[in-house]
Amino acid sequence: MIKRTILFLGFILGFFFNPSSAQDKNEITRASNQSMHLKRKLIKKFHLMLKTFDHLTFETYTPRKINLRVISPSGAIVHESFIKNAKMTWQFDAIDSGIYTVEIENLSFLLNAKIDQIITLNRYPFHIGAPKDSIPFSQAIARTKSIESEGVFQINRFNDKNLNIGPLDKGDTLLFSMTGVTKRTPSMEIVNGSKELLFSNRRSKNTVEAVIPVISKDSFQITMISQAWFGQENKFCVERITPFKYVLDTNLIPKPIVYDTIPIDFLDTTIYLGAVRDFTNSNSEKFTFNFKADTSIAFWSVVFGTGVQYEHLMAALAESVTTDSISDGVGYADVLKNYVLGNPLDLIFKKDQTLISEQTRNGQNITIASKKSENFEDITNFTYDNVSIIPSSQIASKVQMKSGIHFALMDDLCCNHFLFFKNEDKNLGKKVYVKVLLFRVKKKDDI
């Protein structure tokens, strides 16, 4: 029993302590180790909270005669087996989500039954936090290990010990250890908020260890049951391990410009570039922008990219900001998607940091220096995903890139600005995406 626990401990620590595995793995294994004495003619009942397609394996051993039953949420008996002085393995996949009941019945009229059981649950998919670079505003959270509770206690036959732990978050790991100081450790059980029996152990002269991965936010109750008349002294420790993960930091997401300007979609297009050897589709395209005739434009932004990563990032960002937009009651999803893909810390808009706009004889004189990132690249041309991109000199002086997306925040309204795309791949066609958003100065009539 202890060896199995130690091996499982190694597996869990390897899973949650490895930064890469915490993101690459999309399946979790939870093994409930249960060792118990069942009184004669007694039926032990406990629950399993399962989701559709959860895979379970029951490994049950007893030197006596018992019945094992698994009952579905609808009350139907999914499985029943008679076990007599043997080890039995049984597997099944949950069809319905809900509370399953497990019953273990001691069939002896005279003797207690000693039972060892491991119930292994495999859940897929299982994700912790956001995938790396799934959105431009995710940040890494390092793993931690902390002590939730520890101490030395004594219990007797009429004074069980209960510990309430949590709540712990999804992806955390609960570690419990107990050592008998004067006698054997008492019998014990660990259940979660859904009353699932996650660990049980008979009295033992060895250190008792339990490793429990948290598959959803949950609290736990640890119960130690003494059968000693004159008490027994024990030492325990409960620890919590949090995994390495990426999370969305909403504090980094800039709010829209709602005080000074009105956003206008100028261009939103997807263009297919043929391969070099494609004689039916052109492998190049040029986009030209000229706004000098429109003096109501304060500034503009251009976002462009190519490849699957660009599609995924923009889709993830659009989904997250649309949700925020609905909850805030402000329709700014389109603004966020296109304008704030720069350094988030430099693009936060507050009432006391509104855009400076000033009407002059020569047209618009717009100052946005306080909102622009300074990490510009001096780019004349570059290649991404086998697509050569040549921006005009004005755009090139302000091009930035984050998470595979190129963008430029522009206040230069003169001249012809352009982006030239050329597919250099001889065999594969490519999609390129261009979006230009204009920000017009808000007039009194717009209020």
Image: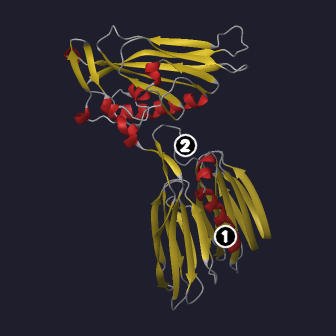
Mark sitting on residue 132: 2
Q: Amino acid at mark 2?
A: Lys
Q: Position of residue 446 (x, y in %)?
A: 24, 17
**Percent position (x, y) of residue 135?**
49, 37
Q: Residue at x 46, y 79 (%)?
A: 151
Residue at 55% from the left image edge and 29% from the top image edge: 310
Tell me the element at label 2.
loop
User: In the image, residue 141 lies at what x, y percent?
Assistant: 48, 52
What is the three-letter code of the residue carrying label 1? Answer: Ile
- Residue 147's tag is none
Left or right of 419: which side holds 199?
Answer: right
Q: Nearer the viewer, residue 422 or 12?
A: 422
> On the image, numbered disc 1 is attached to which residue?
6
Residue 229 sits above or below residue 303 on the image: below
Residue at image position (55%, 23%) is 381
Q: Nearer the viewer, residue 380 or 183?
A: 380
Q: How is the image coloured?
A: secondary structure
Q: Quadrant of residue 101?
A: bottom right
Q: Is residue 269 left or right of residue 429?
A: left
- Neighbour tally class for label 1: few under 14, some 14-19, many 20 plus, Cα within 10 Å: some
- Quarter occupied by the N terminus: bottom right
The answer to whether residue 158 of the structure is visible from this angle is no
- For the residue labelled by badge 1, is the local secondary structure a helix, a strand or a loop? helix
Residue 27 is left or right of residue 146, and the answer is: right
For the residues labelled 1 and 2, the Cα–Cα distance comes to 31 Å
Question: Which of the two residues, 442 or 187, is positioned nearer the viewer here?
Answer: 442
| Above or below for 115 versus 53 | below
Q: Is residue 231 visible?
A: yes
Around disc 2, counting alpha carbons within 10 Å, would you say few (fewer than 14), some (14 to 19), or many (20 or more)? some
Q: In the rendering, at what x and y percent does residue 270 appear?
A: 55, 17
